[in-house]
Image: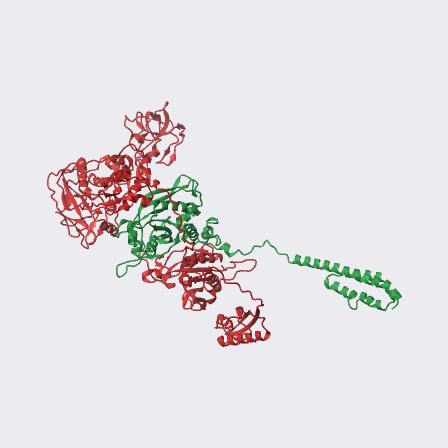
Chain colours: A red, B green
Amino acid sequence: MKFTLSWLREHLSGDYTLDDVTDALNRIGLEVEGVEDKAAKLKGFTIAYVVSAVQHPNADKLRLCMVDTGGAEPVQVVCGAPNARTGMKSVFSPPGTYIPGKDITLGIGSIRGVESRGMLCSAAELQLSEDHDGIIDLPQDAPVGAVYVDWIGLDDPVIEIAVTPNRADALGVHGIARDLAAVGLGRLVEDEIAPVPGAFPCPVSVTIADGAPCPAFALRLIRGVKNGPSPDWLQAKLRAIGLRPINALVDVTNLLTFDQNRPLHVFDAKKVHGNLKVRRAVSGESLLALDGKTYTLDPSICVIADDKAVESLAGVMGGEESGCDEATTDVLVESALWEPINIAQTGRKLGLNSDARFRFERGIDPAMMVPGLELATRLILDLCGGEPSEITLAGTVPDTTRSIDFPLSLTEKLTGLEASDAEQVDILARLGFTVTGTSGTVQVVPPSWRGDIEGKADLVEEVTRIAGLDRVPSLPFPRDADARKSVLTTLQLRTRKAKRALAARGLVEAVTWSFVPKLQAELFGGGAPELALANPIASDLSDMRPSLLPGLIRAAQANADRGYGEAALFEVGQIFKGDRPQDQFTHATGLRRATAKPSGAGRHWSGKAGAVDAFDAKADALAVLAACGAPVANLQISTDAPSWYHPGRSGTFRLGPNVIGHFGELHPSVLDALKVAGDGKSPLVGFEVVLERIPEPKAKATRVKPLLELVPFQPVERDFAFVVARSVASADLVKAAAGVDRKLITQVSVFDVYEGPGIEANAKSIALSVTLQPREKTLTDAEIEAVTAKIVAEVAKKTGATLRG
Amino acid sequence: MSVAALPDLDALERELSAAIADAADEAGLEAVRIAALGKKGSVSELLKGLGAMSADERKTAGPAINGLRDRLNEALSARRADLKAAALAQRLETERVDVTLPVRETPAELGRVHPISQVIDELTAIFADMGFSVAEGPDIEDDFHNFTALNFPEGHPAREMHDTFYLPTKEDGSRLVLRTHTSPVQVRTMLAKKPPIRVICPGRTYRSDSDQTHTPMFHQVEGLVIDKGANLGHLKWILEEFCKAFFEVDNVKMRFRPSFFPFTEPSMEVDIQCDRSRPGEIRFGEGNDWLEILGCGMVHPNVLKNCGLDPDEYQGFAWGMGIDRIAMLKYGMPDLRAFFEADVRWLSHYGFRPLDFPTLAGGLSA
């Protein structure tokens, strides 16, 4: 909402400055977005008298002027304007002045060998108009030495405020003035709006069809008007706030829109056929609107139609056919009320923004419907002459009167601000509220223009914003004396631990979009129709992601394309299996590319890093699981990872029936589909861990750790080399060996895997180291032998392995 | 053996001493020792001969031979020590490496935590200290939690303040949205828990908006306090404490301006004092400029009612701000869009080392 300072002064008398106004506006919640003061940068331009203008000695087209600028001596200026002449008055700028139209700062110049100490200016050079044909030619009574912009009254800053959706009343200058008066800045100018008597009945009738979203409609004919350009004052006012003057009749409606927040419409009566009807549009009807576009309508849209066709989109925009132009002699002036929701829906559906829509959808003052029409009538009669009819009314202006019980103590209870009863009552009264009572609980009736006021909390806001938020004290709010437990849920703790654990392994945390292209969603197990955005911002941000991998893979490739191919990235974030809250899971996902191994990437004097492999991803996943408190020793690993992993180089972690995560090399065809170079040189490996699937830690009764048991007997290590079919998992051998005596055997590790010469085809050698920890006494050779034999037998039984000869 | 048969001990000693001195290594020295003092060594043989001597002869020869033996032993140990030292010195010399060669960088030095995660950890530390817990909710929300419960009436222009992402319309005509703010978490918290409530709700939010300063996905943190007396004055204090702790300044001036949000009444926007006179840098706690950092207000009675709380019994306040925005203000990233581009150069530069966990004890950004 824009207005000028002088416009405000029409509604708000008193002695105040621009700064007073902007400060007050900010304080009361009408946030100042900007102040444009065209005059401020033109203060250096003064009125001057051209004492003489003669031919420049060295140039045909230049003149040498002696200029009286109000100083002691005339100043010599070289001027190229064809209209420069002796005895004229014009606008002068001394050296050092910034010339906005040329974007230069003037210096003392020498033009064709003659010194020039300043410049006589065109209107274009001051950016006041497009006119650059000659220097400004002022009347003879212009006072020499005066600041030009002050003399022409240009000293009128334009103020732009942001009006929040609840404050429709501040979409008119009068309403803004009322708020400022309430805060003590000047007095509201309230002129009685006297009805203009009609000379004859309105010949056009209005009916409101059942179900039309129009509570009331007022109409009057003014005949015999002479339309044309509106006077300078009105054009200047509209231009100042960025509106284009059209003609007097239309300009009057625009003026009242911004002056009183009362949008109106004018029809050329001669172009209206018969009577007007407010009704819902019939499907297929269309209207060429004043913006030059044709809109196709449907019954959700309310229109004003005559006997022949639709003439106006109710409350949004008028039609071109019945619009007023300079030939208009009889004008129908409309002032109506519309249901805000319908206006908003119509505007949205048609993609049509207008000043009228903006106001009607926020709600205008219903009590201003008829007075607004009277104001318009008076202005039209003043500017265009003519003879008004009586006003014809359809519908009834709704009575919005309501009373709110307001305990004055509520202000302090909700805000801590101390304001006396009298002050509170006074503030409300100044804002136009009717208050009954002076203390305790008072009855407050909001004014007709404040449709946003619903209850007592709204009244607290009114009191507080006018009294001043700076009066709200800062009141300490210490924490409750509760126990200092963790404020984080298990999932939140896991999320932060997973992030730190992965970063500590050299991975860099990325935050990627929650939406991915449909193809990628489908490749990673998603793409369900209910997870596709109805209005994506771009086609590659279309579907809620089923996995964090596609985002990381794309990011790794983008980094590689920039020359940073050794990317190790992770993200801990949400994925979507469905659209219900319980379908959202938190994944910790990592990706390594090329040689970005945990031990370091690329070439190094101590040894070149090899390509990343499934075991790097497995180690990352296990680091997350361990950091999150998963029982890592109990994890089962199977080879049934989802389709986006390499089938032979990937695994799935399970705890009982629950899938906890996956790891491995990415499937080459998935990488192909993502257009990512997944060749042998720069493989991609990744993992996904579902943080919610890690079992909740058992509640512990005590923080005390179990007592440490130190056994005095040395552990014994025995090595075994087994030969087993290539398809057998090493984990099965480990499990079989460990299961022989769970008390005695404390560790089983794989210390060598070999395939090749010496081992038959389709077989491999796996070397296990088994640690025995005696607890009661040192083991005898015979006891060790017995365990060893059992291990060999058990591993053979479970896996078919034989001891290597 | 007669006395006359005694060899020239001096010559023998000279010979053996020379052999000891000439021994090139411990093995050579050992050979000399064996030749002299071994079972059949020359000196050992002489010692054996003592038994056959007369007492007189022994009186002279005994001390002479024993003396020789002792001197040889001494010379041997001295030489052995020298050889050992020389051998060690030589080994150490050959074991010399170029310690200026670079080592592989520690993974923990390479890894980074994203500034958003770091700032969430900072916020958590600050508000946990003030007795707040952390609440979260789903990104895909229904109309009730995202709008209706928060007092956004259907068709109200306030809904248009949010450029909402929608999921497909369902058979019953309803459609889910990507939450446009983290306020639905407040609704879920109030519906699930009886007051007193003190929570912060950090998380991802979505609006279909994209330009220099807007991304379709961004992060918000909101705070909510509900009890029987929490008022704007308390909110003011909490926000002041937060700004001091977060921006790590001793004092901070704030300016409250009336504003509008459907879910609070009264509603305010808050500006924070700063100094923007240096290009590309904002300093907090000083200067004459103001910067808007958050919106807040008293929870609207309709919201309390919608969440099953009696507005005549309970009251409280809420505030919300952009995590990405306050991260930019504190750490000076110039462009919001870069937060989500996963450029490792940006992440390495603006990210945080994994062990730099924010704590109040250590200073949040120390």
Residue A170, can we see it? Answer: yes
Closer to us: B197 or A664: B197
Q: Is residue A599 left or right of residue B41?
A: left
Residue B255, image quadrant:
top left
Residue B145 image offset from top left, x and y in percent: 31, 55
Q: Is residue B77 left or right of residue A800?
A: right
Q: Is residue A73 left or right of residue A192?
A: right
Instruction: Give the farthest residue toward the left.
Output: A200
**Above or below, comparing residue A124 to residue A163 in the picture:** above
Disc tally is 0
Residue A240, can we see it? Answer: no
Q: Residue at x 18, y 35 (%)?
A: A382
Closer to us: A637 or B133: B133
Residue B13 image offset from top left, x and y in percent: 82, 61
Closer to us: A294 or A771: A771
Residue A573, image quadrant:
bottom left
**In the picture, which quadrant includes the N terminus of chain A?**
top left
Residue B114 image offset from top left, x and y in percent: 44, 53
**In the picture, which quadrant includes the C terminus of chain A?**
bottom right
Closer to us: B77 or A477: A477
Residue A236, image quadrant:
top left
Residue A214 image offset from top left, x and y in percent: 18, 49
